[in-house]
Amino acid sequence: MLECLETSKKLLLLIFGFRKRFRVIGFSMIPLLQSGEEILVDTQAYKKIYPQEGDIVIAQLPFQEEKIVKRVAAVLEDGSCFLVGDNYSESTDSRHYGFLRIQNIIGKVTGKFP
């Protein structure tokens, strides 16, 4: 019963536009997120606060259409974030493209969609 209620809550948040649904592509966040899984993202999470180290976020790469899912490894006072994949050997992340500005963070991953 609890699982059903949690699913209903996620669905309501999605319907009312407080969350967006994304599909994970690639292996950079294994074992936490598998390729093909769908995740829910709170696009309002960082409107008033900066991301915290350890948060899983969706970000837009600068000057590209590609969106990525990564873990926040560091946050500077100016609001820029260093993002890394959990699976370092399979991840293209801030080790390659540097810090991302807070404006590039789309939202915080809040759960998986069943």
Image (spheres, rainbow, N blue to C red):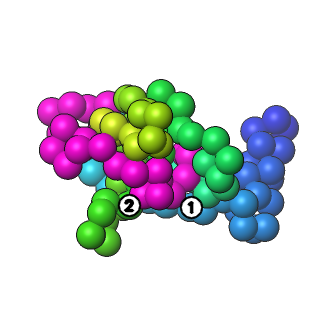
Residue 95: within the magenta? Answer: yes
Q: Residue at x 55, y 45 (%)?
A: 109
Q: Quadrant of the N terminus?
A: top right
* CA–CA distance in space, label 1 to label 2: 15 Å
Q: Residue at x 72, y 60 (%)?
A: 18
Q: Residue at x 34, y 39 (%)?
A: 83
Residue 83: within the magenta? Answer: no
- Where on the picture, by quarter, is residue 24? bottom left
Q: Residue at x 31, y 60 (%)?
A: 61
Residue highlighted by disc 1: 21
Residue highlighted by disc 2: 60
The magenta segment: 85-114
Figure check: 114 above or below 62? above
**Label 1 amino acid?**
Arg
Residue 29 shows up from this direction = no
**Label 2 amino acid?**
Gln
Q: Is residue 73 left or right of residue 90?
A: right
Percent x, y of residue 62: 30, 63
